[in-house]
Image (cartoon, grey):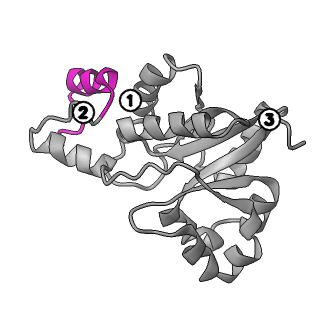
Amino acid sequence: MENKKALAVFGGSFNPPLNSHFSLAEQIVSEYENIEKVVFVPVNSKYEKAGLLSNEHRYNMLKLVCDKNDNFILSNIELKQEKQLSTLETLELLQKEYPDNLIYFVLGTDNLKEFSTWRNPEKLVSEFKILVLERDEDKMEEIINSDNFLLKHKDSFIKTKENIRSNISSSFVRNKIRRGKSIRYLVPDEIYFYIKENNLFKD
């Protein structure tokens, strides 16, 4: 089973997608020989987040980049649902769609801190491997050691080898757009022009 090729699932609002998202995904494929591709899974706009663009716009922006990279897959698995899926439900649906692949879930340390409060965390760690990205000054080991649930299941969490640290966030980019400042080179050119043409993030 361990020689099966894996897919790394990268979920998020991608509001908008940034160069750092794609750089991170490319590094994951490059660093892990068993990870074949990264699957981008944008959340449904039913997800309660202020200022979230429509499903269509966020999907279109991701598609502009994913279509040009054989290492990337874009999934609409959450977008086509009538309800907001839990992480476990999404991963189980993807496992059915890709039965011949192992599924890794990409998780930032900001979310790792809350992981034990998620829906069905035991099933998540028993069925899937969690690839952890350290953010800011976070240390994965310290977070795991401070949480009994995480400590019990520590073998399910894998720290990324080559970590990409960036303080650039989608909210930072949205704020620049609202202030009339340039976001060129913070997002891929295709997305930069898409945002301009569709006059996004102005409100």
Q: How far apart are marks 3 and 2 (CA)?
A: 37 Å
Note whether 31 is above or below 59 in the view shown.
Answer: below
Q: Which callout, 1 or 2, points at the residue further toward the start of the chain?
A: 1
The magenta span reads 187-203
Q: Distance between the residues labelled 1 and 2?
A: 9 Å
Q: Is mark 1 on a helix, strand or loop?
A: helix
Q: Residue furthest top?
A: 68
Q: Are the two marked residues, 1 and 2, in contact with CB atoms closer than 8 angstroms?
A: yes
Q: Which label number is shown at residue 200? A: 2
Q: In this figure, which residue is indicated by the disc labeled 3?
A: 101
Give coordinates of residue 200: x percent, y percent: 24, 33
Give coordinates of residue 138: x percent, y percent: 46, 69
Q: Which label number is shown at residue 180? A: none
Q: Is mark 2 on a helix, strand or loop?
A: loop
Q: In this figure, which residue is indicated by the disc labeled 1?
A: 57
Residue for point 76% across, 77% down: 152
Q: Is mark 3 on a helix, strand or loop?
A: loop
| Direction from residue 137 to residue 105 in the image, left or right | right
Residue for point 72% across, 69% down: 154
Residue 156 drawn in magenta = no
Disc 3 residue type (three-letter): Asn
Mark 3 or 2, closer to the camera:
3
Is residue 52 at all visible to an observer of this figure?
A: yes
Quadrant where the N terminus sits is: top right
Task: Count residues near mark 2 (Cα–Cα under 10 Å), then give few for <14, some for 14-19, many for 20+.
Answer: some
Disc 2 residue type (three-letter): Leu
Is residue 17 at all visible to an observer of this figure?
A: no
Q: Distance between the residues labelled 1 and 3?
A: 29 Å
Residue for point 56% across, 68% down: 140
Disc 1 residue type (three-letter): His
| Direction from residue 123 to residue 190 in the image, left or right | left
Note whether 108 is above or below 197 in the view shown.
Answer: below
